[in-house]
Image (cartoon, grey):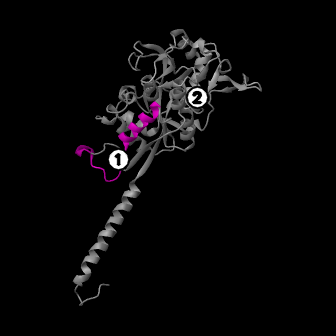
Amino acid sequence: MIKGAPGRINRAALPVACALLLALLAFSENSRAADELRYFRIGTGGFAGTYFAVGAALANLISKPPGTRECEHGGGCGVTGLVAVAQATQGSVENAALVGSGGLESGLMQADVAHWSANGDAPRYRGCTANRAGNMVPARTAPIVKPADGKNLRAIAGLFPETIHVAVRAESTIRALKDLRGKRVALGEAGSGTLADARLLLEAAGLSECDLHPQYRGLSQSAEALSHGEIDALILVAGYPAPALADLAAIIKLRLLPVPPAMVAALRRKDAFLTAAAIPGAIYSGIDAATPSAAVTAVWVTGAQQPEDLVQAITAALWQEDSTGLSGGPPPARRIKRERALVGFDLALHPGAARFYREAGLLKGGASR
């Protein structure tokens, strides 16, 4: 009790009382804001790849921390109280395992990897190992993608096409995929969708890892190795232009090997999610003509355990009318279109995403796809 005359407040103590009251109000407000704050991670890929740049754009689009101005007043148009972040990973395969097990709230992954993880029906490949002489020899067969809690994977949206790139130095004698025999080739790192599809691509070309000197590196390390002549080629599955490849093309002259239609047909017999595509000319410096190839859809995936209202709000924020966070983002993010939201994958939608699409008239009846 403040000392003073009965029925009166001691004027000297009034500033202290006000300060205490303001502190209590601030503490209460901060506690309420902390209670409202939610974090949502997006597993991407390496820092030099397309996934990380797109994941950062998505995170910015759906975030709206407590205290942010309202959308109509120039503030964020994301999910109230949400802080989303892009988290670097090894790529699609690792993201499927992390999201499926609850280690991440969401992740980006290739449609084929999502399907194989959820259904456990990945095609097999014959692995290789080095013998005592250092030569690559056949090992036992194994699935390209091992199922890992895939039953918990649910889709938010199909995003953009990822195209197979096979890059060599311009002066290289390698002109076709069959010429990779005996060469030093970067196939992507363990846990990446690139490695999964590279193994299928080699098989379609009549090769296997045993016919190469395979390298398993991250994209930035592979690009640097190609620039120094330490490898002969690199394979990458990414939305164009892939940042690391664009940077490399600005330093040295590159060529992209074609994936001809007959080979795409062979690929589709093992991977129905791959479709014929082309990398347009002038996407990479010094490569003026379009390069025929194959592409697979990148899908934003979350876990079945994520709250329905949260995922619905995230999906609504993704497809808000004024998606300036995407239109001003990296080139692959600019190709994310609402009309392709349900195209190119067969993973079941998260109930929250399904509710959004149903209310938006994009999904009929009680279907989850």
Residue sitting nearer the eye, 250 or 143: 250
Residue sitting nearer the eye, 242 or 264: 242
Instruction: Please say if the residues under marks 1 and 2 sit with CB atoms less than 8 Å apart.
Output: no
Does residue 75 lie above or below 114 as drawn? Answer: below
Quadrant of the frame with the N terminus: bottom left
Mark 2 neighbour density, 10 Å: few (under 14) some (14–19) many (20 or more): many
Q: Is residue 367 visible?
A: no
Q: Position of residue 42 (x, y in %)?
A: 46, 40
Mark 1 neighbour density, 10 Å: few (under 14) some (14–19) many (20 or more): many
Residue 169 vs residue 181: left or right? Answer: left
Q: What amino acid type should be assigned to the residue bearing mark 2? A: Trp
Read off the residue under disc 2.
Answer: 116
**The quadrant where residue 361 appears:** top left
Q: Which mark is residue 335?
A: none
C-alpha gap between disc 1 and disc 2: 34 Å
Q: Identify the magenta region.
A: 49-74
Is 15 in the magenta? Answer: no
Residue closest to the far bottom: 5
Is 67 in the magenta? Answer: yes
Read off the residue under disc 1.
Answer: 64
Dominant secondary structure of the magenta stretch?
helix
User: SS of the residue at dot 2?
Assistant: helix
Q: Position of residue 217 (x, y in %)?
A: 58, 31
Does residue 100 lie above or below 5 as drawn? Answer: above
